[in-house]
Amino acid sequence: MNASLPVAIETMRATAARVLAEDAQPPTADELHTLTLPCEGHLTLLIPEVLKACLGRPDDDTLTAGALKGVVQARTRLDIVPGMQWSRQVAHAQRLARSVDCLLGHLENLAGKHT
């Protein structure tokens, strides 16, 4: 973990990578639930960290603007209820994982760190 960032970046990236792996077998319903819940939890932790990292930055800062757009998108994705159809649940898990990856990137960029 990057000691200067308050979240477990490697753990979060690994979770997102499992969901987004192109060569992975399609998850079972239980596996899908096991992958979706951590992504939701990661986003719940990441959103306030990204917002905190944006504080005090110039209004016209492009990194801040991009990070705030990522936060809005992540919040929107967290609010979506995918329904009962398995393919929609898989797509929802993938969107959450992409938001985890996105917010981690924004957090690292705002902190000037790259892992």
Image: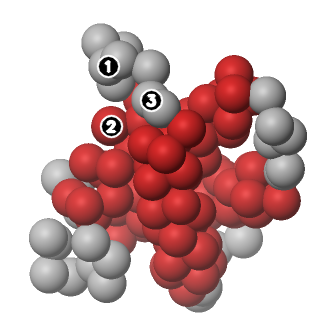
Judge from the rendering whether residue 58 lies leftward or rightward of residue 110; answer left or right: right
Q: Which image quarter is the N terminus in?
A: bottom left
Q: Which mark is residue 24?
A: 1
User: Where is 46 relative to 83, above or below?
Assistant: below
Residue type pointed to by label 2: Arg
Helix, strand or loop for disc 3? loop
Residue 80 locus on image (x, y percent) = 84, 50
Counting residues from the start of the chain, the first of labels 1 and 2 encountered is: 2
Q: Residue 18: which disc?
A: 2
Cβ atoms at labels 1 and 2 below 8 Å apart: yes
Earlier-in-chain disc, 2 versus 3? 2
- Residue 39: tell me if it is visible: no
- Label 1, label 2: how many angstroms apart (C-alpha)? 8 Å
- Residue 13 percent location from the top left of the image: 30, 50
CA–CA distance between discs 3 and 1? 8 Å
Q: Is residue 6 visible?
A: yes
Tag 3 and tag 1, C-beta contact below 8 Å: yes
Q: What residue sits 44% from the left and 29% below the top?
A: 27
**Tag 3: residue type?**
Pro
Given residues 86 and 62, the one toward you in this image is: 86
In this view, the mark in front (3 or 1): 3
Amino acid at dot 1:
Ala
Q: Residues within 10 Å of mark 1 (few under 14, many from 20)?
A: few
